[in-house]
Image (cartoon, grey):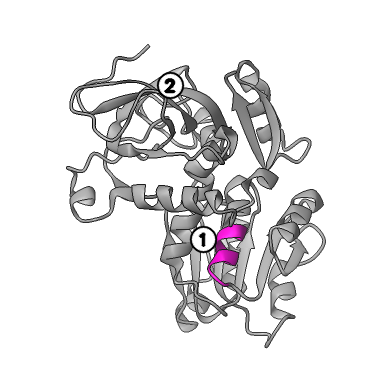
Amino acid sequence: MPEPRANQALVEIRANGVCRSDLHFYRGVLVHGPCTMGHEGAGVVAAKGQDVEGLEIGDRVLVNYVNPDTTCPMCRGGREDLCERPPLGFGTDGVFAEAVAIDARNVAPVPPQVPFDEAAVLGCAGATAYHATKHSGLSPGMSCMVIGVGGVGMQGIEMAKHAGASSLIAVDVRAAKLAIARRLGADVTIDASKEDPVAAVKSLGDGRGVDVAFEYIGLADTLNQALGATRWGGRVMMVGIPKGAITFDAQSFNLGGKTLMATQGHTNEDLRAVIDLRARGVLRTKETITHRMPFKDIARAFELLEAQSDNPVRIVLHHT
């Protein structure tokens, strides 16, 4: 059991989300120093170190796994989403545990109307999608494609809808996930196992493609599809983590004046924003949780996620 140092809170974990990034770390796609895994965690404050203000024992909180240190060049430059300190679960001990000690400034209050399981999901999937949407330049009336509606991509549907996307197109290879995407606000769904998503997107509207495309998987094929489905002057936001090098048609990209961006993580401000959206009923996070199981079954959770058996979107582990 960790001891909270000065300015730290000890958070007793009540629920964890299981993310594809955890699987990437487990399989060596992401390489960091040895640590306790896990980065989506919500729970209660069990203890606090000296000089902690604004938190009380028993407070319901969500952990910011990015855990910005405030001192590195990125943090000092206003980019705490890119803090140089290793995040929880990726080089710093994470939340697949009974408790975690974390800087008190890097936890966010969770109101009672937000269940722990939904709060945990918002800690990465929700906040990452919110951050990506905010930095994509998506604005009301713009057309948008979300390719890959897994745990983070499903939140991407909600965030794009909240940003005012019209029309909003969801792309995946699993009908069950596309059905959820429709319930969450996708105007059009495309099953990429049955039709070419680029051709399908360009058959809509004025035929020029979407203004903004989000890639939430990290595969060469899906990134190229996102680039191909974007109109001249459009933007592609890469959120999925690739396993290695990706090649694309650079001439088409160049002549089309397109913009390719990438984002990971989020800020404390983003985290508080998504909690507020869920607390006000704007987000339907519950519908993105397809599996719940006790923490002791974590190995089974990883197997389900890797095999994609039973169409998992977000798997949540409970500690009680």
- Could you say where residue 216 lies in the image, as x and y percent from the top left? 57, 54
Q: Which residues are magenta?
A: 157-164
Q: Amino acid at mark 1?
A: Thr
In front: 104, or 58? 58
| Numbered badge on residue 36 | 2
- Residue 160 colored in magenta in the image: yes
Q: Earlier in the sequence, mark 2 or mark 1?
A: 2
Considering the image in quadrants, where does the C terminus appear?
Answer: top right
Residue at horizontal 21 percent and vertical 43 percent from the top: 70
Count of numbered circles on the image: 2
- Could you say where residue 111 lies in the image, as x and y percent from the top left? 48, 40
- Could you say where residue 192 lies in the image, as x and y percent from the top left? 75, 60
Q: Mark 1 = which residue?
A: 247
Q: Is residue 243 visible?
A: no
Q: Amino acid at mark 2?
A: Thr
Q: Main secondary structure of the magenta part?
A: helix
Q: For residue 107, what is the image quadrant? A: top left
Considering the image in quadrants, where does the N terminus appear?
Answer: top left
In-image side of 71 versus 98 (left or right): left
Which residue occupies the extreme top position in the image? 1
